[in-house]
Image: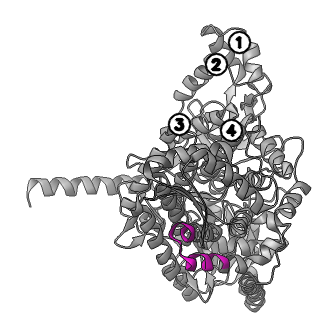
Amino acid sequence: MDRNTIGKWLVAFCCIVSLLAAKEPVNALIHEESPYLQQHAHNPVHWMPWGKAAFEKAKREHKLIFLSIGYSTCHWCHVMEHESFEDPEVAKVLNRYYVAIKVDREEHPQIDRYYQQIHRIITRQPGGWPLTLLLTPDRKPFFAATYIPKEAKFNQPGLLELLRKAADLWHKEPQKVERLGARILQVMRQIQADDTLRGGKIDENFSRRFVAALRESFDPRYGGWGSAPKFPRATTLTALLQIYRLTGDRRAFQMADKTLTAMALSGIYDQVEGGFFRYSTDRKWRIPHFEKMLYSNAELLEVYALAAELTGKQLYRRVLRETVAVLDKHYRDASGLFYGASDADSLDPESKEKAEGFYYTYRYDRVLAAAKKAGIPDPAKALESCGLTEEGNFIRYRSHLHLRQGIPCPSRLKELLQRIRRERPYPFVDCKLQASWNALLIHALFVASSLDAAYGKTALHTLKVLREFLDLNGTLYHQKLPGRSPKVPALLEDYSFTAAAAIDAYEFTQDPTWLAWAEDLFARAKRRFESGGVWYDAQGAFRNPLSLEGGSYRSPLAVLADDALRLAALGEKLEYQQIAEGILRQGSRILDAYPQAAPMGVLVWLADRYGYVVLKAPQAQLGRLRMAVQRQIGYPFLLYKQVNEALYQACRIDRCFLYDRDVQTFVRHLRERLSGSIGEKISPQKVR
């Protein structure tokens, strides 16, 4: 044995000795790539990943399954881990009576989607994370909850009590548990069957009904919907703005503009660095849950870009500019793709402990002293205008910023606050590179390119990287970790969102290879996820029929239908339109009964009803045409295509209806024709 080999063995031996000396537990999650599963790999709970081995163990040992679903940047997931999963007493009960399974909802959203519905059936309440379920050995669910404290509090039993009682019931009356689980599965199957039934009837007043339904729960004082917690509902805002552009409905615009302004001035928006947090814990948007998610920022970028173009408001442009900058700074991988999320918790260097929102919040006295030292004029007034007060508005007398007078923080104070942050550790960033979420961001950047072409260039580069690293040998993948090969096959959301971004890229560059790729992605999606007219979220035995209803972000099926409509118009291929209309018929029940739950579906129905219009021009004139149209026409369903004919043309899928050699005459006639086709006045002028 040579010296190098001996050295390697000694290093390995020392590592083993140090692990044994530390007595740190290791479970089966240690072999998983998911950052979330890795966070739990050293819990004393004998966690197993979702899969055949765990299911066979449960059946072989006749044990209940304890299923926990979460993600790496989830605050309450961390709380439950520290309280319970790191606790030896809880671990002892779980290891003795259960097979404990951990699922990363971002790695396997189809599993999460299924069990969130199970939670709704059992509790009649919306779900969330961590999602906690008890299943029989053959996976019949009979209990569901979200966060559960170790000991009883918040008017709910503690986890230890629950685990012991459920194990005792399973030991004494397993048939009772089996029957309960069977009934729940029967209800679930009926719901899934209902999702595949047609039957809704959508009338001509559909957009008005959508707006009226949203007005019922709209908060006229602070914007948004409901009280608390309050979510941005970005796709709903996009739908409202597009309905205003389509029909001139002022109610739609007012709800969107009120909400976008309120959020931009509040604590759900990071006033120091930019970017949005996932949701607000209060009605006024003051104190957020401090996670930043790529998907929520992507969807909000799109709607703020639309609002900036429509209104000309500098506030909206600033939000757009700062959000793109913070994503580029903290969430962009060296490859060019973007990471998925950052944690709500961050390290307090003084206490050496993680605290929710520490990185983003400030102590008044310390900032005031620093502001005086920096020579900032009237520092107390400057701090107050940004929401920094002595009593604070968060834990431990800390303040989270919001703009009290609607005026941005003084630039020197903002620079000071940024310097203070640079001395703190940035929150943990989940470095998964997901196809669907990156594609959502790419789409948003292409939308913003009408304001600044640099956004389009960033989008195009990111899409090229996505294609290079996640679409390999005819297989699109859901995600990868930096420096590693992808392993998780793509879901429908990856195909539909990426195809949408590819169509955007075609419009931006007029390079036909992007349109060809979009068609290829669509064809692969149809082969993999459609069966008997029903579209599913994933392949394999564990899959869910999809509807037009949105969830944490827009419906992948609605986006796929929109892809089909755009491909139909650009390629003049009726078969795509037939697919889109089939999806809309399939989803007509939710659109008819509860349209506010399906805002992307509403937009796609309107796009099909009024029709995409393809504007054609020679290459040298296409940019000029686009600029003229953006200034004068509000119609939201426009596409652009380069042609060799020396004419400006406007075409629907079945015919071209307008030709002209002069761009201004063409745009004037186009505006008249589109207004007449809708039957209502378009309001294309900027709203000041």
- To which residue does mark 2 refer? 413
Q: Main secondary structure of the magenta part?
A: helix
How many residues crowd around disc 2 within 10 Å: few (fewer than 14), some, or many (20 or more)? many
Label 3 to label 2: alpha-carbon separation: 19 Å
The number of numbered discs placed on residues in the rendered structure image is 4
Q: Tell me the crowding category of disc 3: few under 14, some 14 to 19, or many 20 or more residues within 10 angstroms, Cα based.
A: some
Q: CA distance from mark 2 to mark 4?
A: 17 Å
Mark found first going from the N terminus, 3 or 2? 3
**Can residue 592 be seen at all in this image of the molecule?**
yes
Q: Secondary structure at mark 2?
A: helix
> Any magenta on residue 580?
yes
Label of residue 269 in the image: 4
Q: Is residue 380 above or below residue 646?
A: above
Q: Residue at x 72, y 43 (%)?
A: 288
Kindly report which numbered mark, 3 or 4, lies closer to the viewer in this rendering: 3
Q: Amino acid at mark 1?
A: Pro
Circle 3 sits on which residue? 325
Q: Residue at x 83, y 40 (%)?
A: 284
Kindly identify the amino acid type of the residue bearing the numbered disc 3. Ala
Looking at marks 2 and 1 on the same chain, the residue that comes earlier in the sequence is marked by: 1
Relative image position of residue 390 (x, y in whole percent): 78, 21
* Residue 313 % position (x, y): 70, 34
Give yes or no for contact between labels 3 and 1 (Cβ–Cβ under 8 Å).
no
Q: Residues within 10 Å of mark 1 (few under 14, many from 20)?
A: many
What residue is pinned by disc 1?
Answer: 379
579, 231: nearer the viewer? 579
Point out the stretch of residues depicted in magenta. 567-581
Q: Which badge, 3 or 4, comes first in the chain's sequence? A: 4
